[in-house]
Amino acid sequence: MNPLKVVHSTVMSCTKCQLANEGRINPVFGNGKTVRPDLMFIGEGPGAEEDQCGIPFSGRAGREFNKLLKALGYSRDSVYMDNVVKCRPLQNRTPTTGEVESCHSYLDQQIKIIKPKVIVCIGKTSASSLMGVGNKPMKYIQGTWKTYDGIPITTIYHPAYWLRLENYDKKAWKEVKIKTFEIMRGVVKKAQNLEKQNEQG
Ligand code: SF4
């Protein structure tokens, strides 16, 4: 069987952590381009809409995120979208470190199978788990680079945060969106340069 399908099937019946018992409807596996995409995005965990339909980033924040992808010249099918935990934390609470650790082996296997050129952590929970940045605020770590298993990895604010800002601080909302777009242009350039280097052998 295709190795990604094996991981998918294990996740669908997983009860390794507390999130299996918090009322999840569907475990939410990653989706998109599964063979060496330029970009793999990793968020925190499924929300209510994702839990209902089983598709990552399908809620309001995901639709907002799609606009950013489109502006960068990518479609949802041309990138891979995933989360650090596959099951919805009740009332969208932040998953615990133990829950993230329990789910990590699935994500790690997905990364090794898919082999993205660049990984982008969406939000602090993902960055803390995959970039080893501890509890540092996003304003200091957004756009910084590390490697995960030899793959360049960076982080941007979660689109749910942009949406919250839009309601109470239009100036900060604009600044975050401009900064995120600027970071993402650098990310795309890095992925394209890696592809060129690969072609040149
Ligand atoms: S969050 Fe991950 S480890 Fe926990 S039950 Fe769901 S699939 Fe299993």
Image (cartoon, rainbow, N blue to C red):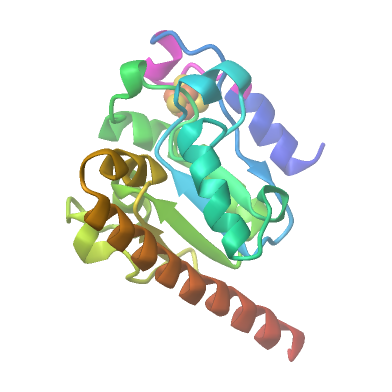
Q: Locate residue 141, reporting x and y percent.
A: 26, 63
Q: Position of residue 124 (x, y in %)?
A: 29, 48
- The residue sitting at 73% across, 89% down in the picture is 201
Q: Is residue 109 visible?
A: no
Compared with 188, 82 (above or below) is above
Which stretch appears magenta? 12-21
In the depicted view, which residue is nearer to us: 188 or 154?
188
Across and down, in percent, residue 18 comes to: 36, 16
Residue drawn at x 37%, y 59% is 177
Give the answer, above or below, for where 50 lies relative to 135.
Answer: above
The quadrant in which residue 17 appears is: top left
> In the image as oriented, which residue stretches furthest toward the bottom?
200
Q: Is residue 158 left or right of residue 201?
A: left
Relative to 137, 24 lies left or right: right
Instruction: Residue 13: say if magenta.
Output: yes
- Residue 65, can we see it? yes
As drawn, 38 above or below 25: below
Q: Nearer the viewer, residue 168 or 65?
A: 168
Inspect the magenta stretch and tell me whether residue 120 lies in it: no
Q: Position of residue 190 (x, y in %)?
A: 54, 78
| Residue reaching furthest to the front | 170
